[in-house]
Amino acid sequence: MEMVECSLAATLAPRTLPGRVRKAPPRPAVLAGRARLRVRSARREQPPPPEPVAVRGASGTGHGGRAVRQAAAGLAAAAVVSLTGFAGDVSPLPTPPARAESLTVAFPVAKARQVNRVQRTLVEAWGLIRETFVDPTFNHQDWDQKLQQTMVEMFPLKSADAAYSKISGMLSTLGDPFTRIISPMEYQSFRIGSDGNVQGVGVFINREPSSGRLLVMDCIQGGPADRAGIHEGDELVEIDGKSVSGMDGEAAAQRLRGRVGTTVKVKLLDGTDNDRGGRNRQKEVQLSREIINLSPLSTTIISHRSDDGHECKTGYVRLASFSQTAAAEMENAVKRMEDEGVESYILDLRNNPGGLVKAGLDVAQIWLDGDETLVNTIDREGNVLPINMIQGHSLTHDPLVVLVNEGSASASEILAGALHDNGRAILVGHRTFGKGKIQSVTELDDGSALFITVAKYLSPALHEIDQVGIQPDIQCSPDILSLPRAPSPRENSEATSLEMDSCIMVAEQALEIEQTKGSAS
């Protein structure tokens, strides 16, 4: 039977932050991370395992010497591994040398050309998982055997979609829903430009942990979803006639994005209106995709009179997501409000699903001084690495309250943990989502993209974030409030509506207490 030999270099990037796409080097490079095929008929024997390669900050070298030896359906597959060190480029984490593994795998050639190409993608993805996935036991399974099994299952297939499904099935056995592959078409839809714009319908969605429902967290003001009457709390049921059951928020978002001018039909359950039977009313709308400006920040100043007649100003800052512009916009907003005499701040991270972790770290440095630890990472060998500021200078030392809830995830949790554990902010709200994973994103040879969980985050005080979340200091339950103050006649309608929010009321009371103690350090 004709076999194909696939040689590639599987690169271990030291640690990669979400939002930074790692693209493999061009095809001609010697260590290009690309599958190069030639026909062969002989079985390649495994050489002696190489000597371990020292990597700063790591205590092990993975499974560098193990080879695939099992046979299935009379087909042989072998993985021959040698280690070669070369530099990686990952920021803002320290950058130890990366490891590259030269892998040779023999596998049966699929008759369909498009399936054969996905076979090469499978080997590329397998090698990256093998060397970087956060769980070195691969969910207590033989990862080399898994490659062979999937190759055999892929052999008789006739379509690329079916072949990608096999890769997805293999990745699902890792027990981590965030480690996944998306097709080239899906990846092009997923990519967001560096200017903070996206082609879509202007809606933020996230999965509710307790029920698994996909809920609308927010809509971009003036965007297609907002104009169509979609609002926070609506449940997404279908996209273009296909159920979203079992789908996570990112997968649904990918299906909503698309080329400007195209349309997408969505079915939702109204989050505010029930029919006579007590059920949520269904609504179906057709949305036109547009260029959406993902400016993540909105601000207002809440003014009120203290008991002694003094006018107090609280700067309210809502951050909807962590785009590349988030920190710069936050800095400008704080400077402007400082000039307007603001004496305390409320930073609202409720329903913020995250985004670029680097943006979250940059925002933290707007509020913190010195060389504080912003977050810790823990890798697959259990090594803990802190990420610290370098001579940070806070823009303000005014009291700060951060609002969080179950829709606050990823970079939101990292920011909340950094401000809380360093004594800079009081947390008010509800326990956060609990997504503390570090992911690398690698564009593969065929244009698809592989997302791999390579490490996890711990808060500065070494508290678990992943699957645990950040617990607030104060729950925003209305029954712990004293009577709310009447808003000042000078306030605009937005500030007035904020005064009716129970969590804002709790936050203001917490700020009053802090102000009687003096400014936060």
Image (cartoon, rainbow, N blue to C red):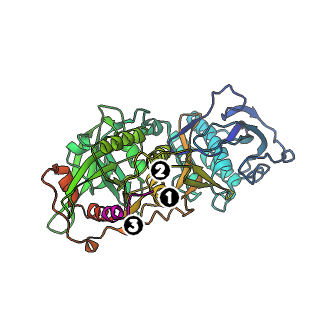
The residue located at (31%, 46%) in the rendering is 203
The local crowd at label 3, few if under 14, some if 14 to 19, many if 20 or more residues have their Cα within 10 Å, is few
Instruction: Name the residue rendered at 52%, 48% in the picture.
Output: 165
Q: What is the C-alpha distance between the residues marked 3 and 2? A: 34 Å
* Labelled disc at residue 349: none
In the figure, 462 relative to 128: above or below? Answer: below
Q: Can you name the residue that lies furthest to the right here?
A: 48
Residue lying at 23% horizontally and 53% vertically, measured from the top left: 302
Determine which residue is flagged by label 1.
Answer: 422
Q: Secondary structure at mark 3?
A: loop
- In this rendered view, identify the residue nearer to me: 23 or 68: 23
Q: Which residues are magenta?
A: 511-521
Left or right placement of residue 129 versus residue 480 in this view: right
The residue beneath circle 3 is 210
* Secondary element at tag 1: loop
Q: Quadrant of the N terminus?
A: top right
Q: Are marks 1 and 2 in contact (CB under 8 Å)?
A: yes
Residue 100, above or below 503: above
Residue 262 percent coordinates (x, y): 30, 34
Mark 2 surroundings: few (<14), some (14-19) or many (≥20) residues within 10 A: many
Name the front one of labels 3 and 2.
2
Q: Nearer the viewer, residue 309 or 506?
A: 309
Q: Is residue 470 above or below residue 268?
A: below
Query: Which image quadrant: the C terminus?
Result: bottom left
Q: Amino acid at mark 1?
A: Asn
Estimate the spatial distance between the alpha carbons at disc 1 and disc 3, rounded to whole Å. Answer: 30 Å
Disc 2 residue type (three-letter): Leu
CA distance for labels 1 and 2: 8 Å
Of pointers 1 and 2, the one earlier in the residue sequence: 2
